[in-house]
Image (cartoon, rainbow, N blue to C red):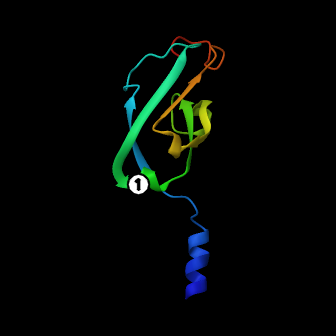
Amino acid sequence: MLIRGLLLASLFPLAFADVKFTSPAAGTTLTAGKPIVANWKDSGDGTALTDLKTYTLFLCAGGDDADSILAPINANGQFSTGNTASATVAATVGGPDKNA
């Protein structure tokens, strides 16, 4: 039974936590070439953020599939450094359409 439990645990190595983004607010217009700053706090659901070590944050647009990922904001974030991440995204990242 113990071996089966360890095997099952090894299949799910990720912890699930939930953050609440406090900025930028939904609907905020971001300007290419200027820093994008994301701030968040623990939502209180799932694993506490204080129990986690690393995160990856991406700028996305559109749907929720792999094609919606535009650029990394922080690919190797450390929760121990706080609840903020920032990056500057070039204008060439989005498509040629307005608001891309």
Residue farthest to the left? 44
Q: Is residue 92 something one can see in this rendering?
A: yes
Residue 47 relative to residue 34: left or right: left
Q: Residue at x 51, y 45 (%)?
A: 80
Against 3, is 74 above or below?
above
Q: Amino acid at mark 1?
A: Ala
Query: Can you name the residue that lies furthest to the bottom here?
Result: 1
* Residue 95 coordinates in the image, percent (x, y): 62, 17
Q: Is residue 100 visible?
A: no
Quick one: 13 or 92, which is closer to the camera? 13
Where 38 falls versus 50 (above or below)? above
Residue at image mark 1? 48
Name the element at disc 1: loop
57 or 27, nearer to the observer? 57
Please state the horizontal and vertical placement of residue 32, each as a whole percent of the image. Answer: 57, 14
Q: Quadrant of the N terminus?
A: bottom right
Q: Position of residue 43 (x, y in %)?
A: 34, 46
Q: Nearer the viewer, residue 57 or 69?
A: 57
Q: Is 22 above or below relative to 29?
A: below
Identified at 59% across, 13% down, the residue is 33
Q: From what the image shows, is residue 51 above or below residue 68?
A: below
Percent across and percent down for residue 89 are 61, 20
In the figure, residue 3 lies in which quadrant? bottom right
